[in-house]
Amino acid sequence: MDFTLTDEQEALRRRVRSWLSANIPEDWKKFGLSEVPRPEAYEFLRKWQKTLHDAGFIGLTWPKEYGGQGLSFVEEMVVHEEMALQKAPPVLNILGVGMAGPTIIAYGTEEQKKRYPAKILSCEEIWCQGYSEPNSGSDLASLQTRAVKDGDHWVINGQKVWTSLAHIADWMMLLARTDPDAPKHKGITYFLLDMKTPGVTVKPLKQITGDAEFNEVFFDNVRVHERQILGGVNNGWAVGLTTLMYERLALGFGLQVRLRITLEAMIDMARRMDKHGRAVTKDPVMRQKLAALWIDTEALKYTGARAVTKLLRGELPGPEASAGKMSWVETHQRLQELAMELQGPYAMLARGAEHALDSGVWQYSFLRSRANSIEGGTTEIQKNIIGERVLGLPKG
Amino acid sequence: MDFGFNADQEMLRATARKFLENECSSEFVRARMAEDRGFTPEFWTKLAEQGWLGLVYPEQYGGAGLGFVDLTVLMEEMGRAVMPGPFFSTLLGGLVILEVGSDDQKKEWLTKIAEGQARVTLALTEPNARWDAAGVTATAKASGGGFTLSGTKLFVPDAHVADALVVVARTRETKNPEDGVSLFLVPANARGLAVKLLPTMDQTRKLCEVKLGDVALPSTALLGTVDGGWAPLARVINRACVALSAEMCGGAQKVLDMTTEYAKIRIAFGKPIGAYQGVKHKAADMLVDVENAKSLTYYAAWAVDENVAEAALAASMAKAYTSDAYRKVAGAGIQLHGGIGFTWEHDLHLYFKRAKSSEATFGDATYHRERVAQLINL
């Protein structure tokens, strides 16, 4: 057991640190330091990711021939930690970097691997994920969007929903049903869809925060060439699951450190707030709640480190990897609730309102955190997965 | 970075599991629960032969020279078997001697402990039930070149089968209660020492009242320096919290294993109960608790081994999380077993009770969260 980094990894940490302090743009502050890419920041974030890419700080674990750095998960973790510690802007093309790229590298033809991953990293092409449908969320394999073969093309009809970034995306990871007669997991194909193809319509959906991060996407006789299939016809379920596994890994690294930073910001606010004539941080009940969050945040870090160790040793992620996402969701939502609680009546003011504490950023993040237990697999589905795949309990 | 156990540690785990399956069955545990002594000399000798009684002591004192990460592995397996007896209490006594004992004291006592020839417990707490220095009110007064100890110690583990007790006593009244505390090695047969075994809810853990009725000790009974006992004792308590957390993780994992197996075979409404989300989701919650408890405990073990600056914080984080986690997991285990889980016959109550006694030992989750709050400067 050893938490020390190699000299090279420590050198990388110093390099990332000094690069970030010199290169995070001043005007980032005016976007409120939001960890979630917010619409007014899209253009800013596009440029930021390009800068990151030029410096070689994105796609660290991807092979060099496809635009990456060919490094290990430790280097990836170091970079994520430093970015979070310096409150660097988030990566806009997160679905491409976290999911599409690794999946294409895992399943793509040589032509596909040469074509897509590099442009994902540079943010030249933004990706969205066409999985969920109005009637297929947690039961994803029941999806109804159809693809029918017509010569060397497939013709797609149907609808996706909750599609983050679809309104600015160039490409979509699309799951569509190619064999309606096969068992539901076996008739699905994974397409790489150009969002500019005729017949694709994107309608933004306004969400609980007032922002429109996600969309409905409609397909009306959309023609896709068969070379856009990833991983073979009717093999889409396996390919799609790979994407989800990468999602959990990719998002996991940065999440813990960002959680810690959010926690420290909240403690900072708690020191300024009064409760019964003393600082909130001196109230015994609040101290218990704050300490519990601190402990849970640290637990997430070490649970993550155990999962990374398994990967480094060439083993499959174990129970600790499954525990990670659920713990993060629960801890983050509890943190956001506490951040509102300790504000007392200030919690009622809107983001940007006069008198709002920290410009009302907590009101936004509190609302946004409700999505955490839904997006990327609901907590209920996560519990099914842990119950069935990790503990080996029978399916319902 | 490598946050996992190495091949030797995995081998230690396998060896310990096999040994305890053979030597520490449910029948063995229950027989020890029903008697006052709580262990057998044969079993103790076998622990010594395995090298486990001296696992973390240097080789020059008869130990195996291993660290707390290794001990974590062993404690997890002992928790898994709800192993009864004075292993943990003897670890406490031994760690104090290791921390502050003179070379002669270490040579004598650690060697005897490692060989299975001596058991040494720690008499810290008193009827005021405090785990901090302010709770130490028993006194040690200088007299005739030695010391005279008076007071009452309570919740002393395994004092009735100890050969000696490390007694924490106040040698000076000071403004800061952490100053003026001293440590003494008191032979069990010292005049004026009265040990009374108390019935415990967790019968695998024996606790005693220890009365110090003007116990006269020679100056050589002092461990470390006069008035300077608290700081080294605090380091021992941190280590004790880590070892106890590890034992709790092992117990919690076993409850999860038992519950998962039961949920696969118990049929209700025509299906194994594990197929129902009401059961499955509770089992998933148990797994999350167990995994996070392990993560914090393993980190704390590494932190005390490496003596990093945040070792105390790491130990408190582990004890806080694990105290809640084991209690919740053991409770959920009973719930998911239904009526059978509530019987004396089923082993679940051994774990449920051990969870509770471990939670209360060296401070519960609330106590340690407050300590965390202090250590992160809230």
Image: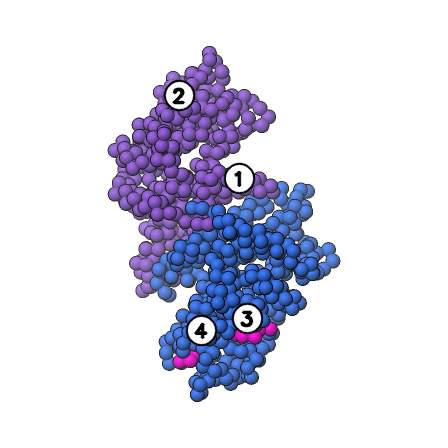
Chain colours: A blue, B purple
Which residue is under mark 4?
Answer: A110
Distance from Cα at disc 1 to Cα at disc 2: 39 Å
Q: Secondary structure at mark 1?
A: loop
Is any atom of residue B160 visible in this view?
no
Kind of residue indicated by mark 1: Ala
Give the label, 3 or 1, closer to the camera.
3
Residue span colored magenta: A168-179
Q: Secondary structure at mark 3?
A: helix
Distance from Cα at disc 2 to Cα at disc 4: 81 Å
Give the label, 1 or 2, closer to the camera.
1
- On residue B309, the disc is 1
* Quadrant of the image occupied by residue A215: bottom right
* Image coordinates for residue A214, horizontal then vertical, percent: 58, 70
Kind of residue indicated by mark 2: Leu
- On residue A119, the disc is 3
Give the label, 3 or 2, closer to the camera.
3
Kind of residue indicated by mark 3: Lys
What chain is tagged by disc 4?
A
10 Å neighbourhood of mark 4: few (<14), some, or many (≥20)? few
* Image coordinates for residue B264, horizontal then vertical, percent: 32, 59
Which residue is under mark 2?
Answer: B193
